[in-house]
Image: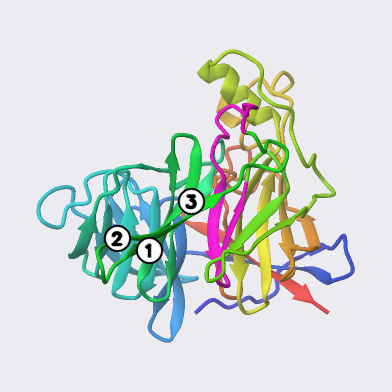
Amino acid sequence: MFSCNKSGTTDNNTSIIDSLEISSKYIQPVDSIQFLQSYNLSCSYPCGDSLAIMGYNYRTHALDIFSDSTLLNKIQLEHHGENGILGRPTAIMPITRDSIWIYDQVAFYLIDSQGKLLYKFKEDRSVFLNANYAKQTAVMGWYDNDCLLYPVDVNGRYFVEYYSLKQKKIVKEVELDGAVCNRNGKNSYGYMTYPNVSFANNKIIYNYPYESNIQTIELSTGEKQEYKAESKFTDNTINPYKRSINSVEMLEYAWNNVHFFDVAYIPQVELYVRFILDGIDVKKHKDRDSVVDARKLYVSFMDKDFNVVGEFPLKEKRYSNFHGWCVFPRGIIVYVDNLLGEAQDNLVFDILAPVLH
C-alpha cells in the first residue's frame, strides 16, 4: 500500500547504506474526520494484502487507520460501558486486523476492528508503557501466539511480564539489567528513569534514554547481550542529574541532553533502526514552546548484531520530535509537523527507506 517513489535523498556517512530514499505523502482530508498532524502513538496495521498505519487520535478517542493517500478506516473507542477504554492509551499493538491490544494506564484491552472488547485484564504493578520524548518509549510484544509482553517496575527493579492469554495469568517474568553507565541505579537522570523496551526477532531489546548502549535478552533462552551502538553525531552518555527535584529544571535537563529512543526492526531490509534527539542549549533558545522542535533529529540503522551501518541527520525544523514516527516493513514513517517549519493544513508524512548496496 505504501509506495516509495524517490523524491529526495540524504547523503550517507558510512559505506554500508548508500543513502536514504525520501518520499512525501499527503493524506486527503475526509469530511467529519479530524486528523492529527502527527501521531506520537502509531504503528503498522495489517489491512488485507497490504499494510496501513494505525494512530491513536487523542482528540476523538479513536484509532485512525490510513494509507499513503487516504483514510481507510476509523475504530471509534468508547469511554464507558462494556466496551469502554477508560483512559488515554499509552500503547497500541495490532496482532491481526481483528485483534488489537491497547493499554491505557488502567487496564489491558483486546478489541476487534469494530472496537468491541474481546478480553480485559488489570496489572497490579506499575506498568511503564509509554511513548514520551522526555521520558522513555516502551511497547508491547506478542510471543508464541499466546503471551502478551510488557514491562513493569517492581520497587525500582524492571521486569518484562509474559501474560498468557490461554491461561489468563502471568506465566513468566524476566528481569532487565540497569544501564551500563548506571549499573547500581544510584545516579539520577531526571525524567529518564525507565528503559526503552521493544521486541523483535525473538528478543527483548532495551536501552536507557541517556546512553547509546543496547541490551538484549533472548525470549526462548534468556541469553543476554550488550552492544555499544554509538552515535558519531551526539554524545553517547550524559552526565547525571544533580539538581533539586523540580519539574522545570528536570525538563530543561532533558532538553539540554541527548535522548536515545527505542529500537525497532524493519523486516524487509533486515535492519534495526533508532531515532536520536540531540540536546539543545536552553539558555540560547529562549522560546520554551518551540525548544523541542528546534532540536536536531538523527536516525541510526543497525545490522543483526547492532553494528551501526548508517546514521543520518534529518532535515531540521520539519519533523515532529515528540516521537512522531513509526516503522513499517519497508521503512519508516516520519510525520511532518514542526512549529518552526512550514505550516501544514493536512496530515503529511515522509517515508524514509535505506538504500542498500
Q: Of marks 1 and 3, which one's residue comes earlier in the chain?
A: 3
Tell me if label 1 and label 2 are in contact, CB under 8 Å.
no
Quarter of the image for residue 356 reads bottom right
- Give the residue type at disc 1: Leu
Q: Residue at x 39, y 48 (%)?
A: 90
Nearest the eye: 22 or 244:
244
Nearest the eye: 75 or 122:
122
- The number of numbered badges drawn on the structure is 3
Q: Is residue 191 above or below residue 195?
A: above
Q: Position of residue 132 (x, y in %)?
A: 51, 42
- Give the residue type at disc 3: Ser
C-alpha span from label 1 to label 2? 37 Å
Mark 2 Cα-neighbour bin, 10 Å: few <14, some 14–19, many ≥20: few
Q: Which residue is mark 3?
A: 38
Q: Is residue 288 above or below residue 258?
A: above
Q: Residue at x 89, y 69 (%)?
A: 15
C-alpha span from label 3 to label 2? 18 Å
Identify the mark at residue 31; answer none if there is no mark: 2
Tag nearer the camera, 1 or 2: 1
Identify the mark at residue 207; answer none if there is no mark: none
In this view of the protein, can residue 38 be seen by the observer? yes
Q: Position of residue 69 (x, y in %)?
A: 47, 70
In this view of the protein, can residue 324 be seen by the observer? no
* Magenta extent: 185-207
In-image side of 291 versus 142 (left or right): right
Identify the mark at residue 148; answer none if there is no mark: 1
